[in-house]
Amino acid sequence: MVKIKEAIVVEGRYDKNTLSQIVDAPILETSGFGIFKDKQQMQLLRRIAETRGLIVFTDSDGAGFVIRNHIKSAIPGNYLKHAYIPDIPGKEKRKASPGKEGKLGVEGMSREIILEALRRAGATIEGEEAPSVRQITKQDLMSLGLSGGSDASARRLALLKKLNLPQHMSPNAMLQALNLLYSLEELSSIMKELETTL
């Protein structure tokens, strides 16, 4: 069991059940889109975020991003960390058929993927020190052709596909994910590889 300082918010009880077998941390649920109507739940999330920090850990499908963005709009960013799971096709064991987008959600991820996502989000894990790395900036994205140019959108989509990241990410969410996953040198190298296919 990995002990994490921050609280974690997930979409539903099956996600919570999966995480509770892997991490020792407070795990809260949004009840899917229920968070949009439940002002008390959002107030609770805000208070917890301000007290101990909050890791948003939603699925990588469109619904997961709608919920993530709603939380981002309601709670100041300095209290939030974002954990992203990769786009992996499939269905959870308990389901008869895959979800609308055919991707595994948080509940379908392996222990290794979940822990890696939490580490990349910057979770404060007992007994581990977070490494300090120079952040990738919006200017870096412009220099790499991922922002501001006529083909920047296509280049971002190609990068997200190559990195197996959710394709629903906005440029700002992508920048955040890149900073959690890669150094500027690694990103530059990946973009050089991509140039041959663009």
Image (cartoon, rainbow, N blue to C red):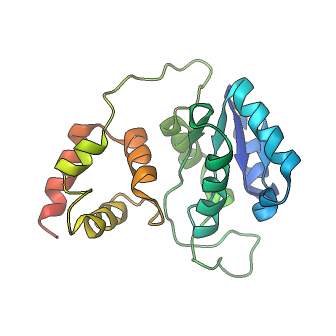
Instruction: Using the image as rendered, state which of residue 21 and residue 159 is in the foreground.
Output: 159
Residue 181 pos. (x, y %)? 39, 42
- Percent position of residue 156, x then y: 31, 62
Camera-nearest residue between 159 and 113? 159
| 77 lies above or below 51 | below
| Above or below, 42 relative to 151 | above
| Residue located 40% across and 61% down the image | 164
Question: In which quadrant is the N terminus drawn?
Answer: top right
User: Relative to the observer, which residue lies in front, 64 or 141?
Assistant: 141
Image position, residue 169 (x, y; %): 46, 60
- Count of marks, rendered view: 0
Q: Which residue is drawn at 79% across and 46% down?
A: 42
Residue 182 in the image: state x and y as whole percent. 33, 41
Work out whether residue 31 can be spotted: no
Left/right of residue 188 with respect to residue 27 in the rendered view: left
Give the quarter of the figure containing the C terminus.
Answer: bottom left
What's the residue at 30%, 67% (across, down)?
Answer: 153
Q: Which residue is drawn at 69% across and 82% down?
A: 97
Please name whichever residue, 118 or 179, is drawn nearer the observer in this view of the structure: 179
